[in-house]
Image (tube, grey):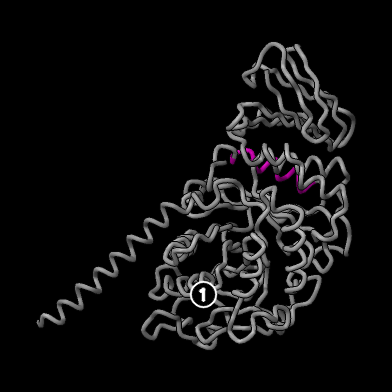
Amino acid sequence: MTFSYLRKTGIALLCCVASLTASAQTKSNFKSWAQTPPMGWNSWDAYGPTVTEAEVKANADYMAANMKNLGWQYIVVDIRWFVENDKAGGYNQTDPIYVMDEYGRYLPSTKRFPSSANGKGFKPLADYMHSKGLKFGIHIMRGVPVKAVNEKLPIKGTNGITADKIYTTAMQCTWLKDNYTVLADKPGAQEYYNSIMELYASWEVDFIKIDDLSRPYHQGEIELIRNAIDLTGRPMVLSTSPGETPIAKADHVKEHANMWRMVDDVWDIWKDLTHLMKVAQPWYSYISPGTWPDCDMIPLGRIAIRGERGKDRMTRLTKEEQYSLMTFFTIFRSPLMFGGDLPSNDAFTQSLLTNKDVLAMHRDGTDVKQLFMENGQLAITSRNSKTGQRYIALFNIGDTGNANVSVNLKDLGLSGKVKVKDLWTGAASTQTDATLSRSIAPHASVLLSISN
């Protein structure tokens, strides 16, 4: 055994140890990437699988000009940006034209994203976002492309392992057949996820929403993804989708993802919100800096321009229902991903997204707790981590008749004379009664701050 061989082997081992150490350090730090709930825009509710570069930039321009100063920062391109011929209103699954490199990694369609031409990928679009002081995100499906498997494309970073060696047809996504499941214990499986995260890091992606991970819960692939992101050294926020994420996996998901969906898609239907409120009940204790139970996108403003469900419209939720949705999302401290077309916002929609008092509660809240959910009534409280003031959200989730929704101030740690402010209207008052009570119409809510 020569000195040269020993020297080379030693260097290789040191490099391996250094890489693993860097990965471990990154993994331990990933929760610092989203200390407050991420806030941004996602293309899905308005544009389905057909959003274009011009539309993405238009929403970014609006956010930069009107919302960035309030904490809104992510612009996320949702599903199937790598398909040339998707159509509005659903998925073109019969004859998709995929854009892919020699390693089976999806690339943006140049028809929809012209700046991605000549192998540039999403780097130019990410550069545009960063020049605006924003952050850029993409959506992908879990798994390895069916096309890569069928064509036995090589996996980057392996010695001859091809895509057909790491897949199974078991648990293939039931609603979109682009990809197969990756067998997490197969040689080449980790390298495949490493290769795509390496690509996204080279594009300077800041946020990755990965679909079909949570229902059912794909623990093996989630671990491969976490490892792959960490290996890049780039802080890319990881969002798993869709729900319902099983509460039995709560401890696992919070150690691997920054945010995870609690439910399937929330649309502009009242029952979607009440279902979310019920499913959210076991998740309150998991609300924590860097790891956020996710209520889904905000289906307000102008949606379904070329979306999946329904025709081009302003949200079907009433104004009171819209207040209730935003009140629940913000006091719960869910990530806020607006689904409507931002340049189409009317004054009311914009007011829901830019209320400074509400956003301060969302940003600085802590100790989020449900006080009760019974008889068509819901009460949630939190505390401002900086000022100590208490917040209380009261909901009438029943369908008929006003409800007197009440809480005892001592349950909020308050007594005596208190100052009360309605965060949506700005109206202020004082009270000395030990019970705080409001008469609330069906589907409506009240959001208050309370302090001595």
Q: On screen, 381 above or below 207?
A: above
| Residue 272 painted magenta | yes
Answer above or below: position of 196 versus 241.
Answer: below
Vertical side of 445 occupied by 224: above or below? below
Q: Quadrant of residue 150?
A: bottom right
Q: Is residue 296 visible?
A: no
Q: Residue at x 42, y 65 (%)?
A: 231
Left or right side of 71 for 287: left
> Residue 52, can we see it?
yes
Instruction: Look at mark 1 in the image and give the residue it sits on.
Output: 199
Point out the stretch of residues depicted in magenta.
271-283
Left or right: 277, with 157 as reference point: right
Could you tell me residue 417's position as x and y percent? 72, 12
Residue ID at (72%, 21%):
407
The location of residue 84, given as percent across then percent down, is 71, 82
Quadrant in the picture for residue 91: bottom right
* Residue 396: x %, y % from top left: 81, 32
Q: Specify the amino acid type for callout 1.
A: Leu
Q: Residue at x 61, y 28 (%)?
A: 387
| Residue 426 rendering spot, x and y as whole percentages | 81, 31
Location of residue 363 with respect to 191 vertically, above or below: above
In which quadrant is the N terminus drawn? bottom left
| Residue 354 drawn in magenta | no
Q: Quadrant of the C terminus?
A: top right
Predominant SS of the magenta segment: helix
Drawn side of residue 423 relative to residue 286, left or right:
right
Residue 408 is drawn in which quadrant? top right
Q: Residues within 10 Å of mark 1 (few under 14, many from 20)?
A: some
- Badge 1 marks a residue whose secondary structure is helix
Tell which of 60 and 254 is nearer to you: 60
